[in-house]
Amino acid sequence: MVRGLVLLSYAALLVALPLAVVWWQGGPVADYLRLPPITHPRPPAGFAWPALGVMALVTGLAVFPLLHRVAKSHCPRWQPVHRRLPLWG
């Protein structure tokens, strides 16, 4: 019983709070209740080369230690074991 009330109150807050904010700011609440919602197409943002460079640098700095350790590891090569399999497998 209590769990149902808690879930119902969470659902009410999930729906009511965004609508209350729109109403508080003086916006049209009916636009948010329309189903299916109407979307307005917008042009995509331009490509940002500096952002790509920063993300590549951060990724490289994060992956470099791992790749460096893998390259410097001196583990022996894997050798296959030549044994007969048991009858069951």
Image (spheres, helix red, strand yellow):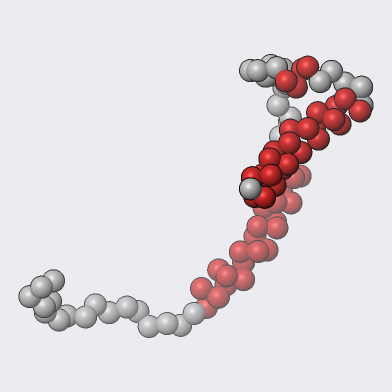
Q: Which residue is farthest left?
A: 87
Q: Nearer the viewer, residue 14 or 81?
A: 14
Q: Nearer the viewer, residue 11 or 73?
A: 11
Picture residue at 68% right of the left edge, 63% below the top: 61
Q: Which residue is farthest front?
A: 1
Quadrant in the picture for residue 66: bottom right
* Residue 17: % across, % down: 81, 35
Quadrant in the picture for residue 75: bottom left
Residue 70 shows in the view: yes
Picture residue at 11% right of the left edge, 78% below the top: 86
Classify 51 as above or below 59.
above
Picture residue at 17% right of the left edge, 80% below the top: 82
Classify 1 as above or below 62.
above
* Residue 25: % across, % down: 92, 26
Residue 42 appears left or right of 70: right
* Residue 85: % across, % down: 12, 76
Picture residue at 70% right of the left edge, 56% below the top: 57
Classify 26 as above or below 53.
above
Residue 57 appears left or right of 78: right
Classify 59 as above or below 42.
below
